[in-house]
Image: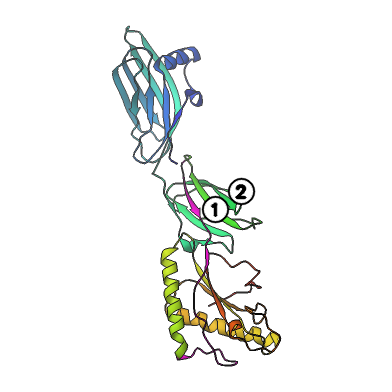
Amino acid sequence: MARIIATLLAFCWLLSSAPAWADATTRLGLTLKNTVSGKAMPAVVIQPGEVVKSITVSLKRNDGKTQKLSAFNVQPSTTKELRIRQEAGQFTYDSHFTVKWASGEPSEFDMRFTMTRVKRLSLKIVPEDVDLDARSMTFTISNPAKYAELSIIGQSGKPLKTIKKDYNAAKSGTRLNLKWKDPGGDILYMDLKVYDVAGFWKGVRLTPFTISVPHDDVEFGFGKWAIRNSEEPKLKETMKHLREALEKHGTLLTLKLYVAGYTDTVGSKGANVRLSNNRARTIAQWFRKKGLKIPIYYQGFGEKVLAKSTPDETPEPANRRALYILSSQMPAKGGQVPGDKWNPI
């Protein structure tokens, strides 16, 4: 992720005559370590093809600060770094090189170059700042931000969509938002990379997650949705399974609980939708009151999805049920979940 760039002198501005500059820099094997992070310092680097008796580099920074670098008796084919003391930031230097070769021959030339030093990059992204349903995420980095790239990979392992957003050197710690459109397929994972202005990057992989929580169905009175005391042990056991799942499968994504309610075919379809919705809401509220802090949603589907096929007006305990889905995103519409009108608690 972090990288050190040795920039060739072609990127610098030549202030002295080209022949003299080119000859001296070639003999010195001169390059620049002009982009660094963390504790590393930018440097003038030489790897001469002949003995350098002495080299002095006088520097004047664009803010007026000066310093002098020097080295002596640098042998052929050895690498010598003349490190520049620089705090985090980007600065331009006017430099004057004075070189004395082993023969006593002198060389002098001027250059202008830019050095960039940034803090070691860190990325902060918390579950509450990633919303797969809204297709949005927010994060911060410890350096000025250049851009972010999000690669969305489908279940086949092939890319579904790649999103890039520029942040125009936003200050370190700025909350950076990234949104994306429907990728047009089920997501296997998403890779986020955030780059700072120096070209360093940090990344994270986000993996959507969904499980159905094992449970014993709560039995309600006919046409009722209040939870009887005798049924609470079932919900307490389900709560135990939920907490175990949250501990085991904790990710960078916020996990949410979706409670779906179903009925048998006794009564009208509309009445059964309302009844199952009320029962699902009651169960969801029970989990919230008992201390489950993750987002909780509920929805009733009535007799739309029967676990056991029966004629109309048939009492069937297997169809009076609930489904508890722990997921990082809204359950896909279809199958056991024929609707997407989830209500939050």
Residue positioned 32% across, 25% down in the render: 69
Residue 78 location in percent, x, y? 34, 19
Residue 74 location in percent, x, y? 31, 17
Pointer 1 or 2: first along the chain: 2
Report the front residue among 121 and 105: 121
Residue 175 in view of the camera: no
Left or right of 300? Residue 345 is left
Q: Is residue 206 magenta?
A: yes
Residue 307 location in percent, x, y? 62, 78
Q: Amino acid under label 1?
A: Met
Q: CA distance from mark 1 to mark 2?
A: 11 Å
Judged by its main secondary structure, the magenta piece is loop
Q: Which residues are magenta?
A: 200-229
Q: Secondary structure at mark 2?
A: loop
Residue annotated with mark 1: 190
Residue positioned 51% across, 47% down in the render: 193
Left or right of 18? Residue 61 is left
Q: Amino acid under label 2?
A: Lys
Report the front residue among 202 and 10: 202
Residue annotated with mark 2: 158
